[in-house]
Image: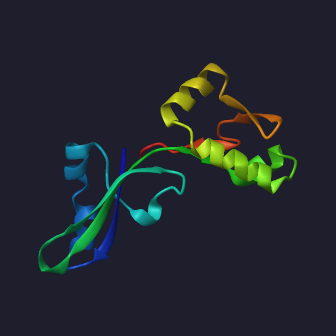
Amino acid sequence: VEFYYAITSPGEGLDKVFSTMQDFFLGAIATVPKPASERQAHSVTLASEGYELGEGAAFTAILARPAVVPLKSALQQACGGDAEAADNLAVWLASLDLERTKALAAEQGGKVGVHLDGKSYTLQAEEHFKWNNIA
């Protein structure tokens, strides 16, 4: 699980808490909080909740799971330049479960296949998509 935060009201020093307390977060939840601006567009939100702290500070915590990250230009090339087909492949890739897809790709030399809109595609990891691993 990845942990992101969006500061909604900075208060005094809240912006520095997340950067200076990284060791605490690693020990407590085994991941380092990252600004919401660094979140991958294709990650899937598991939970999101707002928190208010003393002196007007507030932030939104977002828990998200990693996802497969489509590489749009490579997908478009794989689709013979068809932007709509590439978008459809990107949506399909983004919906996949990370661990299950990694296991499947490992069995098939880093490849995953799909039959979409009447066409078959074989996509290669690191060429057509990347793994969105927890840093």
Q: Is residue 97 placed above or below 21 in the rendered structure? A: above
Which residue occupies 28% across, 42% down? Answer: 30
Q: Residue furthest left?
A: 54
Q: Residue furthest right?
A: 80
Tell me which corner region of the image, top left, top right, bottom left or bottom right, holds residue 105.
top right
74 displayed left or right of 8: right
Find residue 131 and report its horizontal and vertical position in percent. Answer: 55, 41
Q: Is residue 66 placed above or below 21 in the rendered structure? A: above
Q: Nearer the viewer, residue 1 or 16?
A: 1
Find residue 38 and report its horizontal and vertical position in percent. Answer: 46, 61
Q: Nearer the viewer, residue 57 or 18?
A: 57
133 displayed left or right of 118: left
Which residue occupies 32% across, 56% down? Answer: 33
Quarter placement of the N terminus: top left
Find residue 133 and report its horizontal and vertical position in percent. Answer: 47, 42
Which residue occupies 18% across, 80% down? Answer: 56
Which residue occupies 26% across, 63% down? Answer: 18
